[in-house]
Amino acid sequence: MTSKHLNRTAIAIVTCALILSACGNSDTTNSTNSNNGASSNASESANSGASANNNDGASSETVDPAAKYDPPIEFTIVGESDPNLKFDSGQTYEKNGVYDMYEKDLGISIKNKWMVDSKQYPEKVKLSIASDDIPDLMKVTVDDLQQLVENDILADLTDVYEKYATDETKTFMTSDGGKQLDSAKFDGKLMAIPVTNSPYNDAQFLYVRKDWLQKLNLTEPKTMDDVLKISEAFTKQDPDGNGKEDTVGFVAQKEIYNPAYGFAGFFNGFHAYPGAWVKDASGKLAYGSIQPEMKTALKALQDLFKAGQLDKEFFTVDHMKANELVANGQAGMAYGPFWLTSWPMPSAVVKDNKVTADWEVYPIPSADDSPALNQVGLGVNAYYVVSKKSEHPEAAIKLLNRFIEVDSHPITPETKAYKFGSSDQELWKLNPIVVMSQDLNAKTGGLLSKAVEAKDPSSLDGNVSGTAYYNDAIKFLDGDTSLWSSWMNAKPHGSLEIMNQYLTASQFLTNAFTGAPTPAMVAKKSILDQKEQELFTKIVINQAPVDEFDKFVEEWKSLGGEEITTEVNDWSAKRGG
Amino acid sequence: MILKRWAREWYLHLMLLPAIIIVLIYSYGPMVGLVIAFEKYVPAKGMIHSKWIGLDNFKYVISLPDTYRVLYNTVYISFMKMVAGLIAPIIVALLLNEIRAMVFKRLYQTFIYLPHFLSWIILGGIMLDILSPSSGLANQLLQSLGFEPIFFLGDNRWFPYVLVGSDVWKEFGFSTIVYLAALTGINPSLYEAAEIDGANRWQQTRHVTLPGMVPIMILLATLSLGQILNAGFDQVFNLYNAQVYESGDIIDTLVYRLGLQQAQYGVATAVGLFKSVVSFVFISLSYIFAYRFANYRIF
Amino acid sequence: MDYRMSWSRKCFLAANYTFLTVISLLCLIPFIHIFAVSLSSAAAASAGSVKLWPIDFTIASYENVLSKREFLTSFGVSLKRVLLGTAVNMLLTVLVAYPLSKEVSHFRLRTVYVWFFVLTMLFSGGLIPLYMTVKMTGLMDSIWALVIPAAVPVYNIVLLLNFFRGLPKELEESATIDGANPFIIMWKIFVPLSVPALATLTLFSMVMHWNSWFDGLIFMNQPEHYPLQSFLQTVVIQRDMRFLTPEDVELLKLVSDRTSSAAQIFVATMPILLVYPFLQKYFVHGIVLGSVKE
């Protein structure tokens, strides 16, 4: 051990690391450190990692993942700035408490090559790639990743991940069965660290004005027919009682596939899965947007639009504008993810510390007897890549270890500075690597609502976010309306409980294609997507007849869709089905 | 003789030197990058080592079905902007010229020139607001007059005209003042002579004022001809959405999306180069026409 | 002058005043609207009910804006950029326009130079080569990246060289005979005679620099170095929602509302509105075109 100034937390990691490397050397098994809560699954992966080490040969290869660099190394990153961050006095994006922690604990001195607003981040990344000027570590999209791999400018992380990733990290990164980590592998080589997240967070919910349901004597939405009836009643029967026909069924914004105030949940209710690759009857992968179910769903939407049950101008408005319908009490239903009640709904629902409308959340109803499946993706939107020119690719893994370690345990005085400033709870965004749990919310949802109902948090012990939700929900019950969003998530029959039901009842349909874009996708997909969105929106707003859909299917196939389908199926065959 | 000439001219060369250096580095230097148009550009390999593919990028662009739509949109929008941007300020300048009360004249000028100061970033935000079909000022006015509301920014029938209208709205004040400047430059004795000949106001306008404005009209028209493929990136970029790609997508937004969002650098550069060549042809033609027919040298 | 107006002339004038007033109002309304929104309560603004008069009058959004560090720093960057950029622009405009206003008989390479400059209005290497050039010349992330690449405003040069051509030739000829060199002639004769044109072009240049946003986004590496319009683009234009994580969403709750962006927009236009009246009196004489061959 070279480091001299270890604080308590670091000692804990070092201990754990020592045990792990010991197990690697002696080939003993199942030495689990109870301090970091690692499961037996974790020790298996640690074990395989250790044996990989041994395959490399000499035992001197064994490394200490938590070793501090001395003298400190410089590690360049790029980042997204956030105008709402409030730094402690004297701190900046270049020099702040979070970076200081990494320098103190790991000897990694983080330098920003550039830092821009998140809206410009994708363009700036493209510029960096195009001018061959990338930092040691950078967060990129899957498209960028593909391009970077093809251009051969990324470090192969396979070995450093095996050697340096801790037990805890490996568990964390593969709790979904390894799908997300696999998506970063090219020809078996790990070329990036996926920004893990829960795919289940994409689940859709139906939000309904319960007070309107009651007023108009309507039943709760169980089937799509119920939904359509409610929509009609909300439009025609004057639910706000002002004597004017100024209400509509749904809140919607211009992008029909957008998770919030979009129609993803509506499509899924018809068993249509736009944008996803699904197995067809013959077992082949087919594109969801061109299946007949999609046409049925579009027709249904067009009917809603024609009947005035959608805002006449929804296809021009953004979320904030659409939210005005909620604020003004002019719409009674909306599809959205669990975070819809965090954004943008609260500003429209909670006014002057009062919850002004009684919104309830329901599972998405199905158009027939089989339950609706929630279309979800891989759950990974981005990847961290390391430059081939980087002198310390392993530093990226050390950063990852550290973040997971800090994030998975209750905050201590020693680790507080990784996440919070003295006045700002959002400083964790400055961590150079941020990954999210793959199943936390969906798992927590099962316990949370019961805990809230019983006002007993004991089942949530050690669950950081679950406890936070619980506390928020209790505070809401005590009158703090600013926590309405947490309440909607955590309450009995709230969105997280429903998410848990989805999970236990297997009501998820995972996009069957999880690879990087194929060559034909890179070349043609964006144009096809654009055409798709353009036409489907037109159908919905009745500027094109529904039968245009059939023409589009043919066009889609001939303009590259056929080629893409072949590539996707080849990919699937290579994966073994 | 030659020496004498050199002695007189070298100062002039010297004056140009700083600007020439800057232009060489920052305008001509990057033009080396135009070779990307003929390459399958791979950033890590750089411009020199990327694969040369001749005209393949151009062929690809031609094969794209959207290319023609985009080209048509660009020319259509910029042509309408040119025409409207030429006529509107002339009319307003003539009308302003009739105002004798200096206070009002000054006031009007100040107001109509104001929009010129707003960037499209800011105007984009304002227009979204004002043109909103339900709550926007424009549609409230239409409705109070008994018309159906119009989805200005979401309807392909209206979007190009919104672009033209808002561009004219933003810039006509500027051009108006340029024309006014030309008007004040007209020799007053011409008006006196016309009055003695018994010409009324309208005849004076036709025979004295308008001819006096011809040079500046030619200058502005020529400069705008060079912009025939510039339909206004800043404006379109900040106003358009997927619904109106059909009528609003222009070359510059296409280049931006190809180059930065889809990483098709070679293709994007090829489209850009095409645009430059066409603009060059147009500005050369207009320069020659102006010189030949109006006997006027622009630069 | 005949001061007795005919009936038709009166009619025309009345219509004329009405028409111009309407047009002027059309140009003013957006400013008034934004101003009204910025002075309204957040609730009224987000419900879309504010028109031309503030509802629930409050100056909270201005207090908010003026305490916002990013806004103030980028405001400072923009001021600096305008001062530096305009100074460099004007210097080079005069230095280039003067030689190019000479006839070919006095300056043989004139036409070559003219096209050398005009071509840059038409051709550009595109974004990425420019980015690399700026990087190689070491301007990245400095204020000069916003000043130097845009240092030679060809459009302004064309306007000024036309103005120079319109000045009486005799002045220069007599000075040349007196033995003054072109620098002296330019500085002592041409510049003083061109004050209106120079003032006009100064304003153009200032407006250009104040309103530019794209170069700020591309060349600046830190939010503290953004000029105002680049910063505003991040405020006014909505975020791309497709890649939103639930954690981002938490933050969106705090994102500035409509009144605050209205206030920022308004503050951002103030400097130009303040400068404008001082330069306005020159406009009418600023852009006179000479050199029309009779």
Image (cartoon, coloured by chain):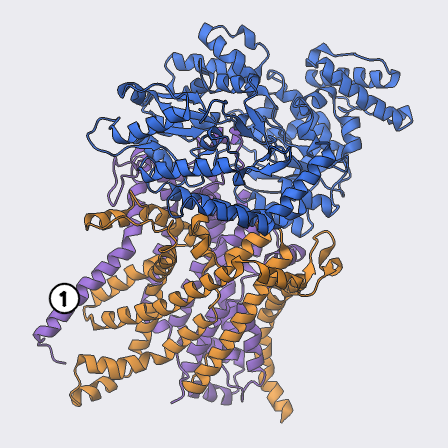
Chain colours: A blue, B orange, C purple
Give above or below for A491 relative to B246.
above
Pick the front one: A367 or B29: A367
In this rendering, position of residue A176 left or right of residue A89:
right
- Tell me: C206 left or right of B207: right
SS class, disc 1: helix
Outermost residue on the bottom side: it is B1
Residue C161 point in image, percent of width and height: 46, 77
Q: Where is residue A550 in the image (x, y as percent from the top left)?
A: 49, 45
- Quarter of the C terminus of chain A within the rendering: top right
The residue nearer to you, when weighing B208 against A508, is A508
Residue at the image position 69 percent from the left and 60 percent from the top: B39
In the image, taking residue C146 as reference, residue A109 lies left or right, namely right
Residue, far front: A282
For mark 1, what is the residue?
C14
Q: Is residue C209 above or below residue A153?
A: below
How dense is the environment of label 1, judged by Cα within 10 Å: few (below 14), some, or many (20 and up)?
few
Give coordinates of residue B1: x percent, y percent.
Answer: 62, 94
Q: Taking the image as drawn, is residue B174 in sight?
A: yes
